[in-house]
Amino acid sequence: EIRTICFNLNPPDFDVADMNAAVSELCTEFEKANNIDCNYIIKDTHSFDQLDSLQKLNLFRIIQEALTNAGRHAGAKRTSVTITSNVNKHLIVFITDDGCGFDLNAYDKKSKQNLKETHFGITGMKQRVMIMHGTIEFITAPGEGTEIRIEL
């Protein structure tokens, strides 16, 4: 467990110059470690060019956290990470799973009422996106899986 924690803090093979390879490897490792299918699709190979090193690391961490949540909490059998860009050349990232989903409103209320019991994964993802001046949207409902949409 300590080895995994150390790896996750600073993956030795993480290379911001090749973000595509880093995300691909993350998906492959997630698939092996969790026995959950993880489909990685990149529709625009230049999508990462607009990001600096810190932004790439933050985006990598967000994807990592979303996949971790799918593996730990969702009971997912399939996940996917899709990278594309829109007509405004904004980077768009979709992270989806077919797991149990959750009530986002109940989660937000619980987070505000009892911070000691809050899991910081979603909060951390929101903060990282905010630092990058982007938006993040969680589309989920109990029994419906989860889709996370990030625009930078």
Image (tube, grey):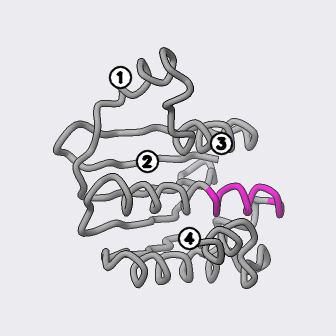
**Pick the front one: 13 or 151:** 13
First to last magenta residue range: 52-61
Task: Calculate the distance from the C-alpha at mark 1 to the C-alpha at mark 2.
Answer: 15 Å
Q: In this figure, which residue is indicated by the disc labeled 4? A: 44
Q: In this figure, which residue is indicated by the disc labeled 3? A: 129
Task: Calculate the distance from the C-alpha at mark 3 to the C-alpha at mark 2.
Answer: 12 Å
Q: Earlier in the sequence, mark 1 or mark 4?
A: 4
Q: Residue at x 64, y 47 (%)?
A: 152
Label 3 amino acid? Val
Task: Report crowding for label 1: few under 14, some 14 to 19, many 20 or more residues within 10 A (C-alpha).
Answer: few
Badges 1 and 2: C-beta atoms under 8 Å apart?
no
Q: Nearer the viewer, mark 1 or mark 2?
A: 1
Q: In this image, 15 relative to 84: left or right?
A: right
**Pick the front one: 30 or 47:** 30
Describe the element under mark 3 as helix, strand or loop: helix
Q: Earlier in the sequence, mark 3 or mark 4?
A: 4
Q: In this figure, which residue is indicated by the disc labeled 2? A: 148
| Magenta stretch encompasses residue 58 | yes
Q: Residue at x 43, y 47 (%)?
A: 148
Describe the element under mark 4 as helix, strand or loop: loop
Q: In this image, 35 relative to 43: left or right?
A: left
Task: Calculate the distance from the C-alpha at mark 4 to the C-alpha at mark 2.
Answer: 19 Å
Badges 3 and 4: C-beta atoms under 8 Å apart?
no
Describe the element under mark 1 as helix, strand or loop: helix
Label 2 amino acid? Ile
Q: In this image, 25 relative to 6: left or right?
A: left
Q: Nearer the viewer, mark 1 or mark 4?
A: 1
Q: Earlier in the sequence, mark 3 or mark 2?
A: 3
Q: In this figure, which residue is indicated by the disc labeled 1? A: 105
Where residue 141 appears, x then y in whole percent?
Answer: 24, 36
Task: Calculate the distance from the C-alpha at mark 1 to the C-alpha at mark 3.
Answer: 20 Å
Q: From this view, report whether residue 102 is shown above or below residue 32.
A: above
